[in-house]
Image (cartoon, rainbow, N blue to C red):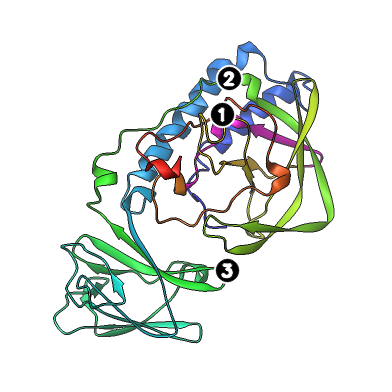
Amino acid sequence: MHRDRGARLGAAAVMLLGAMLLARGATPGVAAGAADLQAERASIAAWRAGRVSRLTSDTGWLTLAGLFWLKEGENRFGRDSSNALILDNPSLAGAAGSFVLAGHQVRFVAAPGAGVTHDGQAVTSLDLASDVQGEPTVLASGSLRFFVIERAGNLGVRVRDLDNPHRRNFGGLTYFPVSTDWVCNARFERYEPAHHLKIVNILGMEEEAQSPGAVVFRKNGREWRLDAVLENPGDRELFVMFADTTSGRETYGGGRFLYIPLPQGQTALVDFNKAFNPPCALNDFATCPLPPSQNRLKLRVDAGEKKYAGAPEHRS
């Protein structure tokens, strides 16, 4: 699904809090008591610090500086206006080379003297693995890093700039107050067989995701449900995309993301204090999935991350 893969820090602390809830005889949908607030705050503080560390790292979402979709054949890349893929950045040569797309394979052919490298070695011509094949092949030019991504069968070139102003000028994130009212042992309703969800991303591309079940929790005197996604067969967590009545107001209009530990039996630990913004809330070059219609709640979830103040206005 290509979201923030590093948003999992603190899962052990969340599981510990869940064990405390169960030990006290909590039933699905019943919030933690006030005695657990200190532990929850400590867990969330560690999680938030880890998230900021990842966002501001060399591979964080704040480094994104470009995204170009490839057409069959030669796609000339560089700073000059004569290129098909133009990136006006001083770290890039006027003519850096070409991305050659043949079927579903991409090869980069460097222009002489362009200064493009891979693993510290000058590149003349190199086949590129995309991100769906695991770790993509990363090319470098000065502070730039570029590599191939695949979304819904479309191949493109994503560019990072380690000196991106968005990274250098990052002003931090804002949050709703931590509350144990938004931590609950939800009921997990397993789908047999698993459901296949149609997920549309912010660019209108459609992909399929596997949902092994839904989490059902109680709030404001009624039950609410969210379909969860298993992104990879061996994952120990489920991924949830949701929107609520804060979306587009206090929080990002495209919804928020959340991880929950893989349910054991019929109980799922849900902590909305760890709801976070998708990468598209932070920059213009991500390809975030949007919540499916059934995950758009007519409920105010005043927990987790708020709208990013440094985002472009149309990203609100």
Q: Secondary structure at mark 1?
A: helix
Neighbours of disc 1 within 10 Å: few (<14), some (14-19), many (20+) = many
Mark 2 residue type: Ser
- Residue labelled with disc 3: 152
Image quarter of residue 144:
bottom left
Neighbours of disc 2 within 10 Å: few (<14), some (14-19), many (20+) = many
* Position in image of residue 158 (x %, y %): 38, 64
* Position in image of residue 256 (x %, y %): 56, 40
The answer to whether residue 227 is visible is no
Mark 3 residue type: Ala
Q: Secondary structure at mark 2?
A: loop
Taking the spot 22% from the left edge, 74% from the top edge, the residue there is: 116
**Mark 1 and mark 3: Cα distance apart in space:** 31 Å
Taking the spot 34% from the left edge, 48% from the top edge, the residue there is: 62
Tally the numbered discs: 3
Q: Which residues are magenta?
A: 264-279
3 or 2: mark nearer the eye: 3
Kindly indicate whether the residue at mark 2 contacts the one at mark 1 (C-beta within 8 angstroms). Answer: yes
- Residue labelled with disc 1: 273
